[in-house]
Image (cartoon, rainbow, N blue to C red):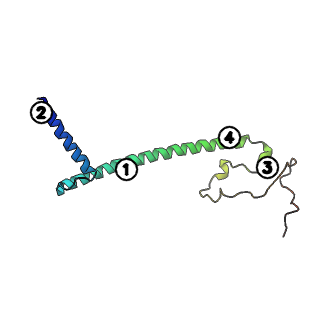
Amino acid sequence: MEGDCLSSLSKKMELLETSKKQLLGEELESCSFDELRGLEGEIEQSLKKIRKRKFHVLEEQISQLKEKEISLLKGNESLCQKLPAWASKEVPPPCPSYYQGTSTQSNRDEVETELRIGLFPAGRGAMAPSPCTKKG
């Protein structure tokens, strides 16, 4: 009785190994046209399941990243509100309200290029031109 059970399990293992190899595209020489068509159908079903799972994972990641973006924007807004009044007069803070309505990177790439060195007296927003600056 045990010998029959062992023989049966051994035969099942061989069939599973053969099936696995065929699903991997190996040892297909002995397959008939109908068997090949069946394998193709199984592989297509597996691909559909894999793609469905992949898109689900991507949707989850996008959702998490959107939540993180909102959190970071709120934190940035909070930090902008905590800036002292004089700091916001010198250089506008990159608050989320600055980016609202911008869908392209070009607006974010604008940078103030004037160099300011030293302390500024209260109420003075701009620096006097440097003697080295050419006016033309």
Q: Position of residue 93 (x, y in %)?
A: 72, 48
- Residues tagged 4 and 1 counted as in contact (Cβ below 8 A): no
Pointer 3 residue: 89
Residue ranking furthest to the bottom: 136
Horizontal side, residue 79 vs residue 5: left or right = right
Picture coordinates of residue 122, whole percent (x, y): 87, 47
Q: Which is nearer the N-term, disc 2 or disc 1? A: 2
Residue at the disc numbered 1: 51
Q: Which residue lies at the image location 14% right of the left edge and 32% below the top edge?
A: 5
Residue at label 4? Answer: 78
Q: What amino acid type should be assigned to the residue bearing mark 1?
A: Arg
Q: Marks 2 and 3, how far apart in space?
A: 89 Å
Position of 94 with respect to 2 (left or right) is right
Q: Are marks 2 and 3 in contact (CB under 8 Å)?
A: no
Q: Nearer the viewer, residue 73 or 9?
A: 9
Q: Say which quarter of the image contains residue 131.
A: bottom right
